[in-house]
Every structure is written in C-alpha cells, then in structure tokens.
Image (cartoon, coloured by chain):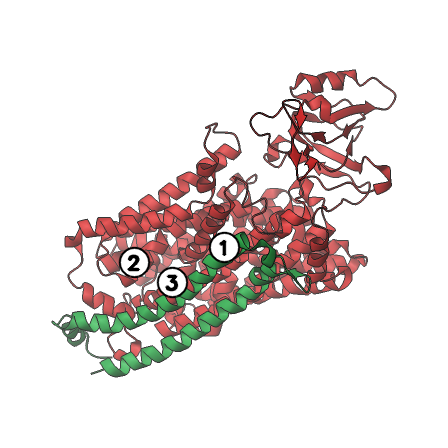
Amino acid sequence: MSIPLIFVLVIIAATVLLGIFATKKSKTASDFFVAGRSVSVWMNASAISGEYLSAASFMGIAGLVMKSGYDALWYPVGYAAGYLFLLLFIAGPLRRFGAYTIPDFAQGRFDSLGFRKIAVVFVLFIGFFYTMPQMKAAGLTMGTILNWPYWVGIAVVGTVITFNVAIGGMKGITVVQAFQYWAKVFAICVPLFVLMAVFGGYNGHLGETAEKVKSTPRLQPDVAVNVNGKEKAPLNTISLTASEATIISFAPDKEYRIAKISPARKPEPGEDKIKASAFITAVRVGSQTNEIQDALAGGKAFDVAKGAYFICNPQTVMKDGKPVMSNGKPLKTGVKIEFEKGGPVTFRPGDIRLQQAVAPNAPSNGKWLNPYGPMASKWGYPVLYTYSLIIALVCGTAGLPHILVRFYTNPDGRSAKKTTLWVMVMLGAFYIFTPMWGTLGRSLMPQLYVTGAFDSAVIKLPTLLENKLLGQILSGVTSAGAFAAFMSTFSGLLVSMSGAFAHDIYGKILKPKATPEQRLVAFKLAAIGVGVVSMILGLLVETFDIATMVGWAFAIGAASYFPLLLLGSWWKGLTKYGAAAGMLLGGLLSFTAIVCNMLLDKKVLTWELPNMVRALMEQPAIWGVPLALTTMVVVSKATAKSIPANITLKMIRLHAPEEMGVSKNYIEG
Amino acid sequence: MQDDAVVEERLSAADAEQLMHRVMWRQARLSLTVAAVFIAVLVILPLFNLLCPDAASVQIGGFSASWLLLGVLFYPITWLLSAVFVKKSDQLEMQIAKEEKR
C-alpha cells in the first residue's frame, strides 16, 4: 500500500470518528442548524477557517502563484483580508439578527416570504458552484496519488461527508472542521520547512529570480513531459522561448496530431505573417521529412510522422520587410504549437552545450516576479484587472452564505466580532505559506508549465527529495491536507444547503407548521439528497479549472449577498424590491459575463469582442458590485412605501449591544 | 432580559428614531474609519507598483519591496487593523450599553 494512501485513510478515519463523537451531543434542531449557538470564539474561528480553506486554497493558490507570480499574490491576500469587511460591517449585525440561515435574514429584515425564495435560490446557486470544484479536487487528488479513476475520490469524499452531516448537522461538523483547520496548517507548513531546508529558502529562490530577470526556468535534461491534447483545451498549447532554438522529439511508438502552429507573440496589425515552416524544421532519422514540411507549409492540422523531431527556431518579427526593433534589438518570437492529440515529448536546447531546454509556457523571471505580469496583462488592461480582482475577493468573501451562516453559531454579536479577528489571524497564518510553494514549484518543477497541472505542485514537490521514504511521507501529509481541505469545505456547504432545503424551503415555505422533529428529519433527508446531487455534479466538471469555478462563486457572492447584507444591516431605507432587483441584476449579470468568457476561451462562442470587454467579463466585480449597490439604492428609493413598519425596531436590534437588554433572536434557541 | 412587549413598545416609541441613530451611528463611524484605512492600502499598493516600479522592485533580503509588502507584511497589517477595531468596538458597545440601559 502506498504511503500517501495511508495518510489519506487516516484523515478520513479521523473525520468519521470525530463526527460520530461530536454527534452524541447533537440532538435538537438548534444543534443541527446553528450548533446550539454555543460555539466558543476559539472553536468557531478554527471551524470557520477550516471550512473556508478549500481545495482552491490548499492546492490552487500555490499553483496560481507558480503560474502567474506576483499578480496571483492578490488571491491569498484577498481571501484572508476579505474577512475585514465582514468584521467591520456584517459579523456583528448578522449574529444579532439571530436566525438559522441567511434566507432567514432576507425574510426577517423585509417581512417578505417572496424575498426568502430569491435568497434560497442564491444559497443553492452559490453552494453548488462552490461544491463542484471541491468534488473535482477530490477526484484529481485520488487520481494523482493513487491513479484511481476520477469518480472514486468523489464517491469517497462525498459519502463520508454526507454521512457526517446527516448524523450530526452543524454541531457535528464544528469539531471536525476545527480539527481539519489544524491538520491543514500542519500539512502546508511542515513539508515546506523540510523542502526549504534541502532546496533553499523562500527569499533565496526569489532573490535568484530577481538577479536574472531576463531568464526563464529550464527543464530537467531528457525527461519526457506529457503534452495535452484537445480534450484538455486550452492547456493543449506550448509556447517556446524566443531567445534560443528548442528541439522537440516525439516518442516513436505514439501518435500525435498538431492542430495549429502560430507565433507565440500575438502579431500586431501590419506585421508580416510568419509561416509555420519558417519556425520549424522537421527531421526524421533515416527517412524523408518532406511530408511533414509540406504539412507545415499547408497550415492545416496534420499527424506527426513516427519518430520525427522538430527543430524550432525563433523568428524575427518583420513589418514591410524590415525587422521590428525593440530596445535597439530586432524583436523575435518563438513558436506556439497547439496539439490535437498529445503524448510524451522531450524538449532539448538547440545549443547542445546548454543541456537543459527553456521550459515552454513559463513567463520570464522579470514578468513573473513583477506586478502586472501575464495574468493581469492578459487582455492588455492590467490595472483594471487587478482592481477588479481585489474587489471580487474582498467583497466575495463577505458574500458566501455557507461561511456567513457560521456566525449564527456564536453566542452573541461581540463574540462574532472576536471570532472574525481570530479567523483572519488563522487564515493569514495559512495563506502566508502558499506563495512559498509556488516559488519552490517554479524553481524545482518547471515541467508543470508544459502540462498546466499546477494544482498538483503541492502534492508532487515533496517527492523530489533525495530520501524517497521521507518524500513519500511528506507527500502523504500534503495529500491528507488536501483531503481535509475539500472535506471540511464540502461539509460546510452541505450544512448550508441542507439548511436551505430543510429550514427555508420545507419549514418556512412548504410546511410552516412542521414540528421541530419533522424539520430534523427533513434536514437529514436534505443532506443525503444534496450529497448525492453534489457527487453527480462533480462527475460533470472534470475538465473545468478549480480556481475558475471558485472564482464564479466569489463573483456571484460579491454582487449579490455582499450588497444585501451591507445595505440591509446599515441602511433602513433598503426595501425588498430594491434588494431583490440588485441581487438579481448584479449576481446574474456577473455570472453571465463569467460563463460567456469561459465559453469564448473554449471557443464554443466565437464573438469578436474588444479586449477591455473581455477583461471586464473575466473579472466582473468592478462593475457588478457597484451595479448591485446602485440598483438597490435606486429601486429602494422608488419603492420606499414597502419599508416594514417596525424597521426602527429591527435596526436597533441589529446593532444594540446585548447588555442593552433589547436583543432578540429571530429564531430562539 | 426584559419582557418582550415592554421592549417592543419602548423601541417603537417616538424617540426610537433617535435611539437608533445613537446606537448605529457611532458604530458605523468606527467601521467606516477602519474601512477607509484598509481601502487606502488596497488602492495605494497597485498604484505604487504602477507609478514607482523602481521603488517596488528594490531588493530587501531576497524579496522585492512589492513582494514583501503583499506576500508577507499584508497579513500582519490586516491583523493589526482588525485587532484595533475589535478593541475599540468592544469599548464602544460597553459605553452604548451603559448610556442606553434604562
């Protein structure tokens, strides 16, 4: 049995046993929905942090920093710092409202059952979007460490967590999530310390990068890398360096098909077209290569003849027959090859003395290390992109229903604020390590740039250690950490969505007279149902990007729940019509923009749009959040008659310190 | 805890509006002050990177100044801001409760 599997089994067993242990104390509806409102600050902060640190945080951010460098640092910072907005504006009032779910707030604040329905839909919408990447991560991790089929990881994680939630509800998972936070912190930092002791520290690697801003990481010599085919699009392209020639050799016993060959640098209008045959000279030992050369000249998709290799030379960019100059030197571009059918290939430098080829697709040190690199500059509007990303992360954190619901589990408003402070400390203590993984990954595993499998860096890096046993053990630790990550996040999502079904849909909309016992049964059934649906959804998203899917949930949350809670808590003039219009407009338009952008990326849609529009579609928060807020204000002003009669009472209760003696929970218990 | 009906009557009285302002406004002002500092940091850092690229890439022990700020120091800065807020908010709530409890 492999060592990582043992670690994964240990974390799964610990999760189940802790869940069963905690369940003994979980009996009433209040226990199931809000853990009896008796969770201490320290425990709740650990549980919130445990729930929040998902697969995207544990595996995704390290990979994103490795891929994009400085710009990706905004992700961990935004994920952690978003809690400051939550602390300043939302944590206290939300807890003082004292409900079971976020749709309770929607109904109670506006005295509107109709608005509860809209709010429930958003809880489920955001919840399922957040669930899919967790499921994908489960399948991916099991596949990476054990070569199990994709669905096995999903089935294992889905079943374990559904069981935990169905038997123990919120009270059952609080202890488990708290434990999983500490497991994750251990798993992110201990293997890292060992790796840094062997391969050099964080600042050492960054310093080396800074000394050679022009250069790019080089691959290990003579190691075959698996190039993706079109089933992994858009990760099926390789862009070669413009600074030197690269030789690509194909395995003689595999079939490859190339879809397109183009310059890696996007040509500007007026520049001369460079032919594919200019970039590549095809060679094949002992036989004719005319057919390949003809195929290259033809510009269509073609099969690579068995045993061929390509000598790829960078070309000078020409305009009207003259070289285009950049900083006094002729501007060159490497070649970009798009594969239809991929397989193992080996990259060698054209200059045999160099031994190691420049890693394809990797940004140069300078671009990686400095702000406004490849990620932010993708559409040519790096500053706009950066600010929009910051808004999405900071506001989105304060708009995730499965996180917000945990604030009801605190005993009072003041402890809710203290909890948020500790959440920020705990999250910071975790996130500060993620860029270190990305930095090491860039120096030590540049082959990941070829395949785009950055998410696996955290699991694969420890296996580089000379001591194979230690490497396996540490890889087991990070695998267990990854498991803790998607298990804890999925359990929180499951509680939040089961609560939406059992409490909001069944208990408040379908059957308001249901007894607490009936509600409890409804909760358990809902947990099983949502668990099964989540597993099925997980099977459908194998080719989607983890970070992208989480980004969707954030963008929708930022433009829907964040404005609702912010204005709902602090402006008594907000009406149900205003809130609903703002949520729907902001949330749905942001969502549409992101989905269309993804379809454009995958070439399902073929609209020609200006780059600025594409940047705003990929990062919609900069217009989505103001749009939602403005709509809420404008529509509320127009419908001011529908402000509830006892609004002053409601607002006082949202903000009155408990010692004033006027506090009252929306739902007692 | 006072009797519910009594509380509700008091909070619906004519002066409830003023009470709401007294309870809410000072808390809002505190939140907005801390938020202003935080937003200023979020706005200035990208501008600093854009307008002073040389200063942003100054080397400090292997880190560039900009990486050190965002990748390392940003976390303690937000901790400090939230710790200050929680402390002040605690004091403020005590004070409000003392003034308004009748």
B5 over A168 or under it: above or below: below
Under circle 2, the secondary element is helix
Rendering coords of residue A553 (x, y %): 44, 49
Say if A204 sits above or below A69 in the image. below
Please identify the quarter of the rendering in which residue A38 is found.
Answer: bottom left
Q: Amino acid at mark 1?
A: Leu
Q: Which residue is at 44% across, 68% downward?
A: A420
**Residue linked to disc 2:** A567
Q: Which residue corresponds to mark 3?
A: A33
State whether discs 1 and 3 lie on one chain. no
Residue A357 image point, x, y percent: 78, 40
Helix, strand or loop at mark 1: helix
Few, some or many C-alpha atoms within 10 Å of disc 3 (few <14, some 14-19, many ≥20)?
many
Chain of the residue that carries numbered disc 1 in the rendered image: B
Marker disc for residue A283: none
Callout 2: residue from which chain? A
> In the image, what residue type sits under mark 3?
Phe
- Secondary structure, mark 3, is helix
Count of number-bearing discs: 3
